[in-house]
Amino acid sequence: MNGCIARRDNFSEPILGMLEQCYEEFAQLTGRRYRLISEYRTEDADTVFVSLGCAAENVECACDYLREQRNAKVGSIHINVIRPFPEAAVINALRGKKNVIVIERTDEALAGDNPLGRDIRTALSKGLESGKHGGDLPSLTDAEMPRIFRGSYGMGSRDFRPEHSLGAYEFATGQTKRKDGRSAEDGESYFTLGIDHPYSVISKDTPSLLPNGAIAVRFHSIGGWGMITTGKNLGEIVGKFGQIISERNPSYDDLGQLEDKLFIMANPKYGSEKKGAPTNYFLTVAPERILVNCELNHVDVVLCCDPKAFTHCNPLDGINKGGSLVWESSETPETAWQRIPAHHRAFIKENNIRVFILPGFEIARDATSRADLQLRMQGNSFLGAFFRVSSFLKDHNIGEEEYHQIVHDQYEKKFGPLWQGRGGVEYESDARRFRARGGNSIRRN
């Protein structure tokens, strides 16, 4: 037991000082500076979020939006070190704030508070003690003590969306109430986000918070049809285009590294969909770093590989005005149009949605006789359709030959070894014809 206690002053207490020394040495060597906590736009903020992990980037997007659209004084703190908890840094960062919103991906209902909330409250309470009785920690006065709100988000892998961050801010500032009708004015300080619960809060404002100039894409397909492969291929192809764009007009950061001109975020819908079940894939391409991390409810292009999608879901959900829908169909444009439910046809007309049909299965059957490859190739025929209906190639001045070469290299990497019984010249001819048909075979309704 003596050894356990000896660790406190001989090891545990000096750790934060060691970390700060390491951060400084690392900054001198690399130019990248890290700290015990990361502060974002907190200097003049009266309301501050506190979070861990990727939630912080979602919150930072929301802070920018709130400042630009509502002139709100709001900021964010990300806790980089959990143990030992950086109490002094937290006290200094939160001193004098009006509201502190602590959000956590957990809920310990039998405890006095959730873990991060307990640590924040303990640090601030110690600051008050230092102000009254002295001590090593920075002191706080009663007037500098903020009100602490606590929220649980992301339970059961649920999305943490922009409207959740906005809802948390609105609740803390008295602009909205929980689902049970209780508010901050009633003394309530706990809420949930993204969960159907009496304590839940959510904003009616639902922005995408994607960077300006971003292209958001949603795939609709069936488990086992190779949609994830299709999404990966599209992401890798766009990534190679991004490298070309960066090298064409190079710029360099303070460390002399080539700066990226194109950023990509891609992921399948979370879950364990079984083979044959409907599923989605999301991809975003933007000229600057993409911070928001959630399923896309606002999209510019929908690539619908599932010919029966309209019978079990709404592929048009969240599509922006003037957006594009590419739908799997081998029928005539007139017949395919009539297969779309009437209320969806009205939505298409009202929002100027461009609708295209693509005979993906027909293209895949012409490309290979293997049934398993036909499913995978059907989805990949939509890659050519994406570049045809979007302005990506034109916006970035990418020529036809350059486009074909990049896509060919990716197809050869993924499908070349599986192309049974074909020599190099014949394979290249087939692959080129396949990707060309994906772009040339679409028909607009």
Image (spheres, helix red, strand yellow):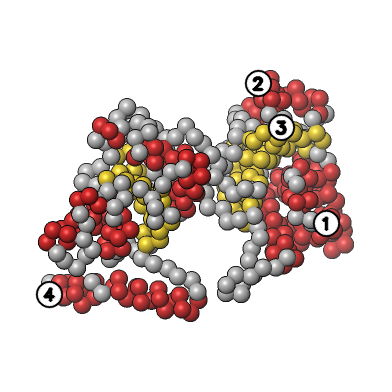
Locate residue 139: give its quadrant: bottom left
Residue drawn at 85 percent across, 58 percent down: 401
Could you tell me residue 112's position as x and y percent?
21, 46
Q: CA distance from mark 2 to mark 4?
A: 75 Å
| SS state under label 1 | loop
Q: Which numbered dot is residue 193? A: none
Q: Is the C-beta separation of discs 3 and 4 under 8 Å?
A: no
Q: Is the C-beta separation of discs 1 and 4 under 8 Å?
A: no
Q: Which numbered dot is residue 2? A: 4
The amino acid on which the numbered mark 2 sits, given as a three-letter code, is: His
Q: Is the C-beta separation of discs 3 and 2 under 8 Å?
A: no
The amino acid on which the numbered mark 4 sits, given as a three-letter code, is: Asn
Say which label, 3 or 1, has the lower sequence index: 3
Q: CA distance from mark 3 to mark 1?
A: 27 Å
Residue toward you, 413 or 101: 101
Q: Is residue 298 above or below residue 14?
A: above
Of the residues tagged 2 and 1, which is closer to the observer? 1
Q: CA distance from mark 3 to mark 2?
A: 14 Å
29 displayed left or right of 114: right
Residue at numbered disc 2: 343
Say which label, 3 or 2, has the lower sequence index: 2
| SS state under label 3 | loop
Residue at numbered disc 3: 353
Q: Residue furthest top?
A: 342
Residue drawn at 27 percent across, 33 percent down: 185
Residue drawn at 65 percent across, 44 percent down: 217
